[in-house]
Image (cartoon, rainbow, N blue to C red):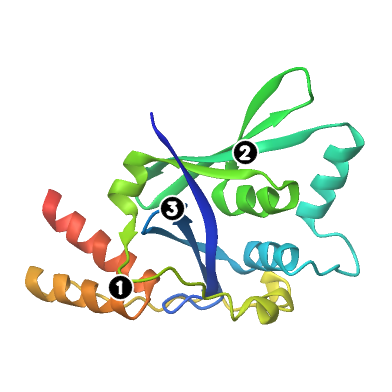
Amino acid sequence: MKKVKLDIVGLSYSQTQSGAYALVLGEVNGRRRLPIIIGAFEAQAIAIEIEKMTPSRPLTHDLFKSLADTFNLSIQEIIIYNLVDGVFYAKLICTDGKSTHEVDARTSDAIALAVRFNALIYTYEFILASAGIVIEGNDFLFLENMDSIAKEPDADSLPTSTKQQGFGDLTLEELQQKLQEAIADEAYEKAARLRDELNKRGTS
Protein backbone atom coordinates (compact mmCIF):
# COMPACT_ATOMS: atom_id res chain seq x y z
CA MET A 1 0.00 0.00 0.00
CA LYS A 2 1.15 3.51 -0.79
CA LYS A 3 2.34 5.50 2.23
CA VAL A 4 1.70 9.23 2.46
CA LYS A 5 3.98 11.47 4.54
CA LEU A 6 2.28 13.78 7.04
CA ASP A 7 3.26 16.82 9.10
CA ILE A 8 1.61 18.32 12.17
CA VAL A 9 -0.12 21.49 10.94
CA GLY A 10 -2.59 22.24 13.71
CA LEU A 11 -3.37 21.66 17.37
CA SER A 12 -6.22 23.53 19.03
CA TYR A 13 -9.02 23.18 21.54
CA SER A 14 -11.86 20.91 20.44
CA GLN A 15 -15.02 22.76 19.47
CA THR A 16 -17.31 19.87 20.39
CA GLN A 17 -15.67 17.94 23.24
CA SER A 18 -14.77 19.64 26.48
CA GLY A 19 -11.26 18.71 27.64
CA ALA A 20 -10.28 17.36 24.21
CA TYR A 21 -8.16 18.77 21.40
CA ALA A 22 -8.13 18.65 17.61
CA LEU A 23 -4.83 17.53 16.11
CA VAL A 24 -4.60 18.15 12.37
CA LEU A 25 -2.06 16.33 10.24
CA GLY A 26 -1.35 17.63 6.75
CA GLU A 27 -0.26 15.78 3.64
CA VAL A 28 3.27 16.86 2.70
CA ASN A 29 3.18 18.62 -0.67
CA GLY A 30 -0.58 18.15 -0.78
CA ARG A 31 -3.84 19.78 0.23
CA ARG A 32 -5.42 17.05 2.32
CA ARG A 33 -5.78 17.32 6.08
CA LEU A 34 -6.43 14.53 8.58
CA PRO A 35 -8.19 15.75 11.78
CA ILE A 36 -7.84 13.56 14.88
CA ILE A 37 -9.45 14.20 18.29
CA ILE A 38 -6.99 13.53 21.13
CA GLY A 39 -6.96 13.87 24.91
CA ALA A 40 -5.62 16.80 26.90
CA PHE A 41 -2.60 14.92 28.24
CA GLU A 42 -1.43 13.84 24.79
CA ALA A 43 -2.05 17.33 23.37
CA GLN A 44 0.05 18.78 26.17
CA ALA A 45 2.82 16.24 25.51
CA ILE A 46 2.91 17.13 21.81
CA ALA A 47 2.78 20.89 22.43
CA ILE A 48 5.53 20.85 25.07
CA GLU A 49 7.96 19.10 22.72
CA ILE A 50 7.14 21.29 19.71
CA GLU A 51 7.61 24.40 21.84
CA LYS A 52 10.85 22.90 23.28
CA MET A 53 9.65 23.46 26.84
CA THR A 54 11.09 21.45 29.73
CA PRO A 55 8.61 20.29 32.39
CA SER A 56 9.75 20.22 36.01
CA ARG A 57 9.48 16.43 35.97
CA PRO A 58 9.54 14.12 32.92
CA LEU A 59 6.20 13.36 31.31
CA THR A 60 5.42 9.75 30.41
CA HIS A 61 6.56 10.25 26.81
CA ASP A 62 9.80 11.88 28.00
CA LEU A 63 10.41 8.91 30.29
CA PHE A 64 9.91 6.55 27.36
CA LYS A 65 12.41 8.57 25.31
CA SER A 66 15.01 8.48 28.10
CA LEU A 67 14.53 4.74 28.55
CA ALA A 68 14.86 4.12 24.82
CA ASP A 69 18.01 6.25 24.63
CA THR A 70 19.52 4.33 27.53
CA PHE A 71 19.13 1.03 25.68
CA ASN A 72 19.99 2.42 22.22
CA LEU A 73 16.48 2.09 20.84
CA SER A 74 14.98 4.55 18.39
CA ILE A 75 11.72 5.11 16.55
CA GLN A 76 12.26 5.45 12.82
CA GLU A 77 8.70 6.26 11.84
CA ILE A 78 5.10 5.91 12.86
CA ILE A 79 2.33 4.71 10.59
CA ILE A 80 -1.37 5.42 11.01
CA TYR A 81 -2.39 2.17 9.39
CA ASN A 82 -6.13 1.75 9.92
CA LEU A 83 -9.40 3.54 10.67
CA VAL A 84 -12.26 1.57 12.20
CA ASP A 85 -15.51 3.17 13.40
CA GLY A 86 -13.85 6.57 13.63
CA VAL A 87 -10.84 5.27 15.61
CA PHE A 88 -7.36 5.61 14.10
CA TYR A 89 -4.81 2.84 14.67
CA ALA A 90 -1.06 3.45 14.66
CA LYS A 91 2.18 1.55 15.09
CA LEU A 92 5.75 2.49 15.92
CA ILE A 93 8.56 1.23 13.70
CA CYS A 94 11.41 0.75 16.19
CA THR A 95 15.01 -0.37 15.80
CA ASP A 96 18.02 -1.16 17.97
CA GLY A 97 20.37 -0.88 15.00
CA LYS A 98 20.25 -4.61 14.36
CA SER A 99 16.60 -5.49 13.98
CA THR A 100 13.34 -3.64 13.39
CA HIS A 101 10.08 -4.20 15.24
CA GLU A 102 6.53 -2.89 15.00
CA VAL A 103 4.78 -1.82 18.21
CA ASP A 104 1.07 -1.06 18.40
CA ALA A 105 0.21 2.35 19.90
CA ARG A 106 -2.59 4.86 20.24
CA THR A 107 -2.25 7.44 17.49
CA SER A 108 -1.93 10.33 19.95
CA ASP A 109 0.84 8.56 21.88
CA ALA A 110 2.59 7.62 18.65
CA ILE A 111 2.68 11.24 17.49
CA ALA A 112 3.82 12.47 20.92
CA LEU A 113 6.74 10.04 20.61
CA ALA A 114 7.37 10.89 16.96
CA VAL A 115 8.08 14.54 17.79
CA ARG A 116 10.56 13.43 20.47
CA PHE A 117 12.43 11.03 18.20
CA ASN A 118 12.18 13.24 15.10
CA ALA A 119 10.46 10.28 13.49
CA LEU A 120 8.55 10.56 10.23
CA ILE A 121 4.76 10.30 10.31
CA TYR A 122 2.94 8.33 7.62
CA THR A 123 -0.51 7.06 6.77
CA TYR A 124 -1.87 5.05 3.88
CA GLU A 125 -3.60 6.49 0.84
CA PHE A 126 -6.89 4.72 1.58
CA ILE A 127 -7.12 6.44 4.99
CA LEU A 128 -6.57 9.90 3.53
CA ALA A 129 -9.02 9.11 0.76
CA SER A 130 -11.75 8.15 3.24
CA ALA A 131 -11.04 10.46 6.19
CA GLY A 132 -9.03 13.33 4.74
CA ILE A 133 -10.38 16.80 4.06
CA VAL A 134 -9.26 18.73 0.99
CA ILE A 135 -8.50 22.42 1.53
CA GLU A 136 -8.42 25.22 -1.00
CA GLY A 137 -5.97 28.11 -1.17
CA ASN A 138 -2.54 28.39 0.40
CA ASP A 139 -1.26 26.20 3.16
CA PHE A 140 -1.49 27.63 6.66
CA LEU A 141 -0.75 26.86 10.27
CA PHE A 142 -3.03 27.36 13.23
CA LEU A 143 -0.73 26.58 16.12
CA GLU A 144 -1.55 29.79 17.98
CA ASN A 145 -2.85 27.86 20.99
CA MET A 146 0.30 25.78 21.38
CA ASP A 147 1.82 27.73 24.25
CA SER A 148 -1.36 27.68 26.33
CA ILE A 149 -1.87 23.98 25.58
CA ALA A 150 1.65 23.28 26.81
CA LYS A 151 0.75 24.91 30.12
CA GLU A 152 -2.53 23.04 30.58
CA PRO A 153 -2.87 20.97 33.79
CA ASP A 154 -2.93 17.18 33.75
CA ALA A 155 -5.86 15.54 31.98
CA ASP A 156 -7.28 14.28 35.30
CA SER A 157 -8.13 17.85 36.32
CA LEU A 158 -10.01 18.66 33.11
CA PRO A 159 -13.72 18.07 32.55
CA THR A 160 -14.57 15.12 30.34
CA SER A 161 -18.17 15.89 29.40
CA THR A 162 -18.90 16.09 25.71
CA LYS A 163 -21.18 18.35 23.73
CA GLN A 164 -22.24 16.69 20.52
CA GLN A 165 -23.66 18.77 17.71
CA GLY A 166 -26.09 16.57 15.76
CA PHE A 167 -26.48 16.75 12.01
CA GLY A 168 -29.22 14.13 11.76
CA ASP A 169 -31.94 16.59 10.74
CA LEU A 170 -30.00 18.06 7.83
CA THR A 171 -30.52 17.03 4.22
CA LEU A 172 -27.63 15.80 2.09
CA GLU A 173 -27.53 19.14 0.30
CA GLU A 174 -27.39 21.01 3.63
CA LEU A 175 -24.64 18.72 4.86
CA GLN A 176 -22.59 19.34 1.71
CA GLN A 177 -23.06 23.11 2.07
CA LYS A 178 -22.04 23.09 5.73
CA LEU A 179 -19.03 20.93 4.88
CA GLN A 180 -17.82 23.49 2.34
CA GLU A 181 -18.42 26.31 4.84
CA ALA A 182 -16.47 24.47 7.55
CA ILE A 183 -13.53 23.90 5.20
CA ALA A 184 -13.59 27.55 4.16
CA ASP A 185 -13.56 28.58 7.84
CA GLU A 186 -10.69 26.12 8.53
CA ALA A 187 -12.95 24.35 11.07
CA TYR A 188 -11.49 20.93 10.34
CA GLU A 189 -12.99 19.16 13.31
CA LYS A 190 -16.52 20.18 12.32
CA ALA A 191 -15.73 19.31 8.71
CA ALA A 192 -14.60 15.84 9.77
CA ARG A 193 -17.88 15.23 11.59
CA LEU A 194 -19.89 16.43 8.60
CA ARG A 195 -17.83 14.19 6.34
CA ASP A 196 -18.51 11.22 8.64
CA GLU A 197 -22.24 11.94 8.57
CA LEU A 198 -22.19 12.07 4.76
CA ASN A 199 -20.22 8.82 4.60
CA LYS A 200 -22.62 7.16 7.02
CA ARG A 201 -25.64 8.09 4.92
CA GLY A 202 -23.88 7.01 1.79
CA THR A 203 -23.47 3.47 3.15
CA SER A 204 -26.87 3.16 4.82
Please name the residue shown 71% across and 63% down the image: 45
Number of numbered markers: 3
Residue identified by numbered label 1: 183
**Residue at the spot 81% in from the left edge and 54% down from the top edge:** 62
Q: Is residue 139 visible?
A: yes
Q: Position of residue 159 (x, y in %)?
A: 58, 78
Q: Is residue 56 left or right of residue 36?
A: right
Image position of 139 with respect to 88: above or below:
below
N-terminal-most mark, 3 or 2: 3
* SS class, disc 2: strand
Splitting the image into 4 quarters, where does residue 8 fall? bottom right
Specify the amino acid type for callout 2: Glu
Is 175 placed left or right of 79 in the picture?
Answer: left
Depth-wise, is mark 3 or mark 2 nearer the camera? 3
Is 177 on the left-hand or right-hand side of 86?
left
Q: Are marks 1 and 2 in contact (CB under 8 Å)?
A: no
* Vertical arrangement, residue 197 with respect to residue 12, above or below: above
Q: CA distance from mark 1 to mark 2?
A: 29 Å
Q: Is label 1 in a helix, a strand or a loop?
A: helix
